[in-house]
Every structure is written in structure tokens, then in C-alpha cells.
Amino acid sequence: MPTQRSTPQIKNEEQYDALRDKGMSKQKAARIANTSSKDMDYDSTPYEKRTKNELYQKAKEVGVEGRSKMNKNELIEALRSN
């Protein structure tokens, strides 16, 4: 039975706990646990084959800071580390 949290913003507690157990940061685990399947990005196109604008929009969705000053390679790196 999952433990009750005082942070009601976590929508899927079990998924959050599993991600935290795997070593994921609190922020990233919460972001994933709060994403519904309809919000998921199912585009399997490798980042390298996407346009800079597509990468910028994805970075905006996930909250990458400083994205407006990044080039394509920096956006790819930021998305992969986020």
C-alpha cells in the first residue's frame, strides 16, 4: 500500500515511488508521474533529426531554462539530461 504524502500534486504515487527508487530526482519523477498517457510524447524521431524549433518546443514543454539561448546541440543535451 503506497504511503500517503502531504504533496497532493503527485497524481500517480506508485509510479512516483518507483521512479524515486530507481534514483530519479524528485522533480523529474513528479513530472513523469503527473503526465497522463494522453500528454506523453510518442514521437520516436531521434532528437538529431528534429528541427531546432521542434526541440525548442519540447524543451518549453518540459521546462528547460535558458532554452532561448541554446543551439540545437545544447537543446538536445538539455532534453536528455532533463
Image (tube, helix red, strand yellow):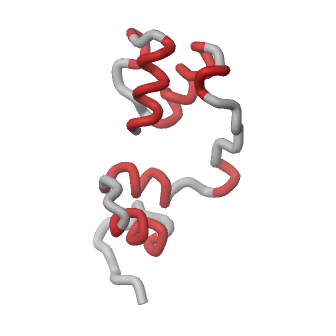
- Residue at x 40%, y 83% (from the top left corner): 2
Total numbered labels: 0
Name the image quarter holding residue 78: top left
The N terminus lies in which quarter of the figure?
bottom left
The C terminus lies in which quarter of the figure?
top left
On screen, 25 above or below 5? Answer: above
On screen, 5 above or below 3? Answer: above
Where is residue 4 shown, x and y percent of the image? 34, 80
Query: Is 5 positioned to the left or the right of 54 in the image?
Result: left
On screen, 11 above or below 69? Answer: below
Where is residue 56 shown, x and y percent of the image? 53, 20
- Residue at x 70%, y 37% (from the top left corner): 43
- Residue at x 49%, y 27% (from the top left corner): 60
Name the image quarter holding residue 80: top left
Q: Nearer the viewer, residue 16 or 45?
A: 45
Query: Is 80 positioned to the left or the right of 48 in the image?
Result: left
- Residue at x 41%, y 63% (from the top left corner): 19
Single out the residue that lies furthest toward the bottom.
1
Where is residue 35 shown, x and y percent of the image? 55, 54
Where is residue 73 shown, x and y percent of the image? 47, 16
